[in-house]
Image: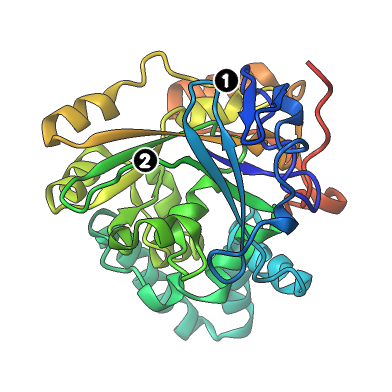
Amino acid sequence: ATGMAPNERVTDNAVETRASYTIKDAHVCEPENILDNAVDEKATPEIWPHTLVTEFVTTHGKKAKIYRTNEFQKFPLTKLAALAFHGTTLLFFQGLAMALTLFWLCPAWLTIPAICIYVAHVLMCTAQHTGSMEWRWYRKSVMAFAGFEYFNFAMSIEDDTNLRQDKTYIFGVHPHGIYGFGQVLWMSTRETNPFYRLFPFMVDRVHATAASVVFYVPFFREVVMMLGGVSVARRTLSAQLARGHSVCVIVGGEQEALAAENGVDAVVIRGRKGFVRLALQHGADLVPTYLFHNVDTFHISRTCCPAIRAWLQRHFKVSIPVFWGRWGSPLPLPRPPTRPAD
């Protein structure tokens, strides 16, 4: 499970778990207070550079740890710039802005052929199925990982989780929210990413996924593919599993994105079993993953033309949520709104 903490400490990540936990000092607490009562992260030793660890024991008696990085703690502008560049709706605007700039600044004899060549490239490109446009050096870069810390992101995992090098996996993620920010965990292969520290053999062998329509959006498509993203189409997932790679799938898709509501984790499962059949066909293991607070990274309106948006989602598989973020912009909120007590 991964989560976004609402303040500088790793706190409140376990809201909505509907279960109590026993911290390692045997103190039982409610879900919303689990990490407030855990071992103070500042007192725990950094087993890896720039990584803080909190230990706890689940109600099932399993030992687990929460990993949180602080590599960019003193560089807030770096985190903001990284997220603004490739983590928000700004990407759509950037693509349009680049196209318009090209149109207005370049002469017609150059602009029109350039646009035709790019459109032909988009229509004929197969990189979204093969992952061939992945830039491994970029996935290891500061820009690919700094957005991870923008949300005070933390990864919680049980100690007995045993991912094997000779297996393939389908990571099923919930909820979608406005954006599937949980996929950052697989997109960035930087050495401080706790997932790849625990399972180094998974580096460059896990692909985030996106809806097919994403790969027709100028510039946005290139950024997704640079980070190792591939299409969520069945043939693409099947091809990646066949070559021994694992994939991350946001199971609820556009329907779950449309159902996003602040403070409510709406999960769509019904009719979403194709990934299970795919796992059976390829002998892949399923790894359930939950992203806490993802629905709180934007202010979401549920009252603006809900019938029209539902119709578009049903007939065209397109989700058009109405939302705004920091300062009324498309930039996500750095600290999700505090949820009311259950």
**Residue 246, how many percent across, how many down?**
27, 48
Viewed as shown, does residue 43 lie left or right of 123? right
Position of the C terminus by quadrant: top right
Which residue bears the numbered disc 1?
310
Between 15 and 248, the one lying in front of the other is 15
Residue furthest right in the image: 327
Q: Residue at x 66, y 60 (%)?
A: 149
Say which mark, if any, is on residue 129: none
Specify the amino acid type for callout 1.
Answer: Ala
Q: Residue at x 51, y 39 (%)?
A: 64
**Residue 293, how many percent across, how many down?**
67, 36
Which residue bears the numbered disc 2?
161
Between 221 and 124, the one lying in front of the other is 221
**Residue 286, how many percent across, how many down?**
30, 32
Q: Residue at x 56, y 66 (%)?
A: 145
**Which image quadrant for residue 176?**
top right
* Mark 1 or mark 2: whose residue is earlier in sequence: 2
Helix, strand or loop for disc 1: helix
Say whether residue 291 is visible.
Answer: yes
